[in-house]
Image (cartoon, rainbow, N blue to C red):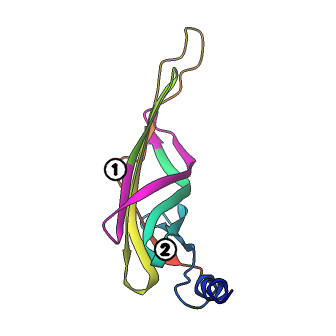
């Protein structure tokens, strides 16, 4: 019985307990309309396991000269070391090739900074249909974020 009570005390909010995630929110450095948010999933003893990152209102410039804003849905990125995370994700199907790259680093004072790249190449539409332009961020969209969960 004493062993069960001891185990319960260890598992409780005292010794060794940590939060399961850290939240961050921010914006594009050169385009404040772009917003980013992500959660850092933590493992035992606070080890950073992965990042769930998403962005909205990312400005794309298209081949036809138009400007569009898109959202980048939440995706998971792995840590490279203790403070940096990055990944490249590809989506291919019959109508589009899409490339997303996200890179970030946790810095002092609850801050984070990084960049994202997004490219969408739309395959030619069938004859008689309106073609869609290819669009991209035309380079890196730099972002900064602040920890929001205290």
In the rendered image, the vertical position of residue 52 relative to residue 1, given as above or below = above
Secondary-structure class at tag 2: helix
**Residue 12 as seen in the image, left or right of residue 16:** right
Q: Main secondary structure of the magenta part?
A: strand
In the rendered image, the vertical position of residue 45 relative to residue 66, given as above or below = below
In the rendered image, the vertical position of residue 82 relative to residue 14, given as above or below = above
User: Where is residue 40 shown, x and y percent of the image?
Assistant: 50, 68
The label shown at residue 49 is none
Q: Is residue 127 visible?
A: yes
Q: Determine the residue positioned at 39% across, 70% down.
A: 113
> Magenta part of the protein: which range?
61-87
Q: Determine the residue positioned at 30% across, 67% down.
A: 81
The residue carrying mark 2 is 44
Most distant residue in the top direction: 127
Secondary-structure class at tag 1: loop
Callout 1 crowding tier (Cα within 10 Å): few <14, some 14–19, many ≥20: few
Most distant residue in the front direction: 1
Task: Give the CA separation, mark 1 to mark 2.
Answer: 37 Å
Q: Quadrant where the C terminus lies?
A: bottom right
Q: Quadrant where the N terminus lies?
A: bottom right
């Amino acid at each position: 019985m004493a062993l069960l009570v001891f185990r319960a005390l260890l598992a409780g909010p005292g010794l060794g307990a940590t939060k399961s995630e850290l939240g961050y929110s921010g914006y594009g450095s050169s385009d404040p309309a772009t917003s980013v948010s992500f959660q850092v999933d933590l493992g035992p003893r606070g080890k950073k396991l992965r990042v769930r990152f998403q962005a909205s209102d990312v400005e794309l410039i298209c081949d036809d000269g138009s400007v569009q804003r898109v959202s980048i849905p939440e995706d998971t990125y792995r840590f490279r070391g203790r403070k940096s995370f990055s990944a490249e994700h590809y989506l291919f199907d019959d109508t589009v090739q899409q490339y997303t790259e996200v890179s970030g680093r946790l810095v002092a004072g609850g801050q984070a900074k990084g960049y994202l790249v997004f490219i969408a190449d739309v395959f030619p539409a069938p004859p008689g249909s309106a073609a869609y332009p290819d669009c991209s961020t035309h380079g890196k969209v730099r972002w900064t974020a602040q920890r929001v969960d205290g």
